[in-house]
Amino acid sequence: MMILLLAVFSIFFSSLAHLFLKKAALLSMQAGRPFLAWLSPYALFGFGILLSTVVLTVALLRELPLTVLTSLTALSYPMIALLSKFMLQELISFRQWLGIACVCLGVLLFNLG
């Protein structure tokens, strides 16, 4: 059970890292320097989080089957959508939510079968 919680933790922080990278890209575009986005503190923090989650994921692969861990990564879709809605004020359409629900249902069916 603890291993699965660590996997969800890793997926959550990976999703959070994507938001930091998006924030870096938005700020660099507003400043008119799109090619310097990767040097911003937001981007560097996002890259650091991604590196940490990769290390954790490699460690988790020792305990979980690849099929389980890979299918759990589909949880990043609703996590990123929710985080971007609340942290970046992005609009998520009903159609996008429906697509996310289909992916999550597919993951559930895959893991039950």
Image (tube, grey):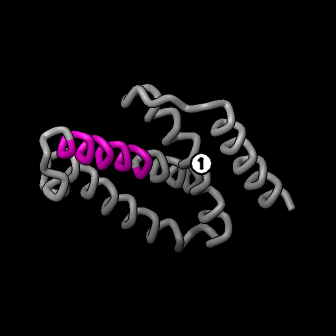
**Left or right of 68 in this view: 33:** left
Q: Badge 1: how crowded within 10 Å, few (<14), some, or many (20+)?
A: some
Q: Quadrant of the C terminus?
A: bottom right
Between 9 and 79, the one nearer to me in the picture:
79
- Classify 70 as above or below 75: below
Identify the main secondary structure in magenta. helix
Residue 66 percent location from the top left of the image: 62, 72
Which residue is rendered at x = 61% and y = 54% of the image? 74
| 68 shown above or below 87 | below
Residue under the point 52% across and 40% down = 79
Residue 51 colored in magenta in the image:
no
- The residue wearing badge 1 is 75
Q: How many numbered tags mark residues here?
A: 1
Kind of residue at badge 1: Leu
Which portion, as a residue range, is magenta? 14-29
Q: In the image as oriented, which residue stretches furthest toward the right?
A: 113
Towards the viewer: 34 or 43: 34
User: Where in the figure is residue 65, as x and y percent of width and height?
Assistant: 64, 71
